[in-house]
Amino acid sequence: MPLMKSTDPCPCGRPQAAVGKGAQPRALPYAGCCSRYLDHGDEAAAPDAESLMRSRYTAFVLERGDYLQATWHPGTRPADLDFDPGTKWLGLEVRSHRSTGEDRAEVEFVARYRVGGRAVRLHETSRFVREDGRWFYVDGDIHS
């Protein structure tokens, strides 16, 4: 399982505000981004579907099956998860995030990774539902 330092850039790539003229935004540090959900999920649930999706991407990078299972809706959650040890996650691009109802949302994203020397691009529109104040991943449609 990969380890993260609190000061490392968060794998989800959520940008922090750029400081200074012409400065490019950098990713928030892990401690100020997905760590609050992955490491303190009982106390700090993701506030919206995009934050949950980003934290789930980070959980895949860090092979945190416990978090993935806890944030997967019980109606669609698999019994167990396997991680391919040769997978190297390369980046996440969130394309859109929209509400589809009072407690429902969709997030379209592209996740890039390399496995067995082959580059893979996962383009998905994921569906999320909020129950008892917590967001859960339900399922998604893969785009080719």
Image: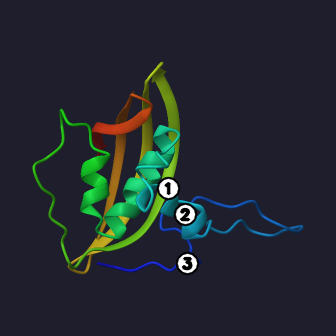
Of pointers 3 and 2, the one earlier in the residue sequence:
3
Q: CA gap, disc 3 to disc 1?
A: 18 Å
Numbered disc 3: secondary structure: loop
In this picture, is 12 found above or below 130? below
Disc 2 target residue = 13
Q: How many C-alpha atoms fall within 10 Å of the one at disc 3: few (<14), some, or many (≥20)?
A: few
Viewport quadrant of the N terminus: bottom left
> Which of the two labelled residues, at mark 2 and mark 1, occupies the earlier sequence position?
2
Tell me what residue is drawn at x 50 percent, y 59 percent: 34
Comparing labels 3 and 1, the label whose residue is closer to the camera = 3
Residue 56 in the image: state x and y as whole percent. 37, 54
Residue 55 found in image quarter = bottom left
Q: Mark 3 and mark 2: span between their CA atoms?
A: 11 Å
Residue type, label 1 = Glu
How many numbered dots are placed on residues in this image? 3
Q: Nearer the viewer, residue 100 or 63?
A: 63
- 118 left or right of 3? left
Which residue corresponds to the image point at 46% horizontal and 39% vertical from the top-left? 49
Q: Residues within 10 Å of mark 2 (few under 14, many from 20)?
A: many
Q: Give the x, y percent position of residue 133.
A: 45, 31
Color style of the picture = rainbow
Disc assigned to residue 93: 1
**Residue at position x 39%, y 58% in the image:** 57
- Looking at the rendered structure, the kind of residue marked 3 is Asp
Residue reaching furthest to the front: 43
The kind of secondary structure element at disc 1 is: strand
Q: Quadrant of residue 31?
A: bottom right
Q: Which mark is residue 8?
A: 3
Between tags 3 and 2, which lies in front? 3
